Amino acid sequence: MPIHVDYLVLGLGGMGSSALYHLARRGLKVRGIEQFGVAHDRGSSHGETRIIRKAYFEHPNYVPLLQRAYELWRELEQESGKRLFNPCGLMVAGSPEGEVIQGVRLASRLYDVDVENVTSREAAERFPGFRIPNGFEVTWEPEAGFLYVEECVRTQIECAISLGAQVCLNEKIISVSINAESIEVRTETERYLAAGMIVTAGAWSSSCLQELHLPLEVVRKVLFWNPVRQPLYNLDAGKGCFFFDMPYGEFYGFPSLDGETVKLAEHTGGATVADPGNVNRELMETDAPAVSRFVSEVMPALDPEPARHATCMYTRTPDRHFIVDRHARNQRVVYGAGFSGHGFKFSAVIGEILADLATQGSTAHPIDFLSASRFASG
Ligand SMILES: Cc1cc2nc3c(=O)[nH]c(=O)nc-3n(C[C@H](O)[C@H](O)[C@H](O)COP(=O)(O)OP(=O)(O)OC[C@H]3O[C@@H](n4cnc5c(N)ncnc54)[C@H](O)[C@@H]3O)c2cc1C
């Protein structure tokens, strides 16, 4: 016998945990299905921390969504009593002609985001752990910071459950059948018939939404924790996150949470993954050199050799912007995909948007620029 549900959420990572919570908050009967456990380390939402910032160099259209995301993260902190967000600030450094510095300034100007320009003399005093390359300009966004990624996912699921949501863990969806009149999902053990569905399958989005032919590429990314040589990066000493637009790639990192290591990574690059369920998690010879070069050149108080690493995946669109839309065959199926390595900070508001789309067919949030139609040929 099939199980009838009002709403199914397929995948409970960053976006799905939020969608589940937002549907449950509206008093709806919702069930979330996840192939692994809560806040697991086999998708894209793990590894301690995620940067959150408002002066969005990727495109200023994201700023209104970020303003709402900030509100929602704060509300969730209040509702749960958990610490999810650490507003430690963010330093951005790059060439004044580069898209990053120019984009930070544009978003800040258009939306009045608080961003300070830091002179090179001030930068040397304020950020003694960094050797800023000649000719670079530096900005500081005091309201930026980081989210505790696993705690965010866990908290959204816990709050959703306390509001009546049902959660099925370690249950893999093996087929999704979407027609104009019906939505049927099969897992290894159950058959579900749903009135509405939100698909938030991360790196598995292409296989869950095969018929849409979404232009997604999954890439393998490695995070590193490098040993601290001098205590110049400590969170408890007021240090913040950093993002460097170097000539050979973009690098970012976090203040040291434990006083012993700094977590950092390259945002650019990454090899294509054929099967997200079978990504190589061992450190490969080609993984560390770019980050080690960055550390040697820019962070003299850090050891260029990592002490440990974690493997994660970006699901990229060709233009690196997200896809948030309704399914062409059945408008009660909505999805969020292709978060392109910068989506987590938005997950609170993406869940709200997906819940709007699934229940009302539209949202008041300005998301036209995230429509799948931008990739339609002809
Ligand atoms: C190394 C790294 C660093 C990043 N840094 C930042 C950052 O600093 N700031 C930022 O904002 N963003 C950052 N991102 C991006 C951000 O983390 C992702 O965009 C976001 O977490 C994606 O969430 P998601 O819900 O789409 O995917 P996921 O969190 O992976 O969730 C998808 C879920 O669907 C489940 N699922 C898939 N298929 C099935 C199935 N068939 N049956 C059941 N369950 C299924 C998966 O198991 C998974 O739990 C980073 C990403 C990585 C990898």
Image (cartoon, grey):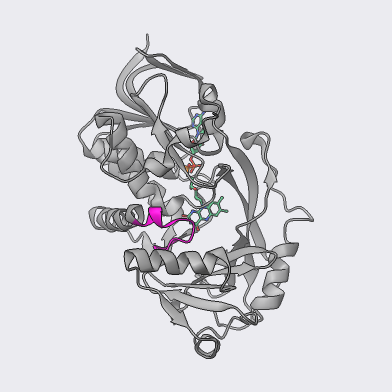
**Residue lying furthest right in this view?**
285
| Relative horizontal placement of residue 25, taking residue 263 as reference (left or right) | left
**Residue 246 visible (yes or no):** yes
Which residue is at 34% across, 12% downward?
181
In x, y percent, where is residue 366? 32, 46
282 inside magenta stretch: no
Q: Position of residue 55 (x, y in %)?
A: 41, 65
Q: Is residue 200 above or below residue 61?
A: above
Q: Nearer the viewer, residue 154 or 361?
A: 361
Q: Image quadrant for the C terminus?
A: top right
Magenta span includes 62: yes
Task: State the residue at coordinates (60%, 80%).
Answer: 130
- Quick one: 123 or 376, which is closer to the camera? 376
| Residue most extreme to the left | 27
Residue 153 falls left or right of residue 318 = left
* For residue 193, side relative to residue 305 (left or right): left
Q: State the extent of the magenta-drawn residues as a range.
A: 52-63
Instruction: Determine if residue 198 is in view.
Output: no
Residue occupying the far front of the picture: 378
Instruction: Count the marks.
Output: 0
Quarter of the figure with the N terminus: top left
Which residue is rendered at x = 37% and y = 14% of the image?
A: 180
Residue 177 in the figure: left or right of residue 194? right
Is 266 situated above or below 97? Answer: above
Q: Position of residue 37 (x, y in %)?
A: 48, 39
Q: Please state which of residues 2 and 365 is positioned toward the viewer in this rendering.
A: 365
Q: Position of residue 372 (x, y in %)?
A: 46, 34
- Name the residue furthest top: 1
Residue lying at 37% horizontally and 41% vertically, measured from the top left = 368
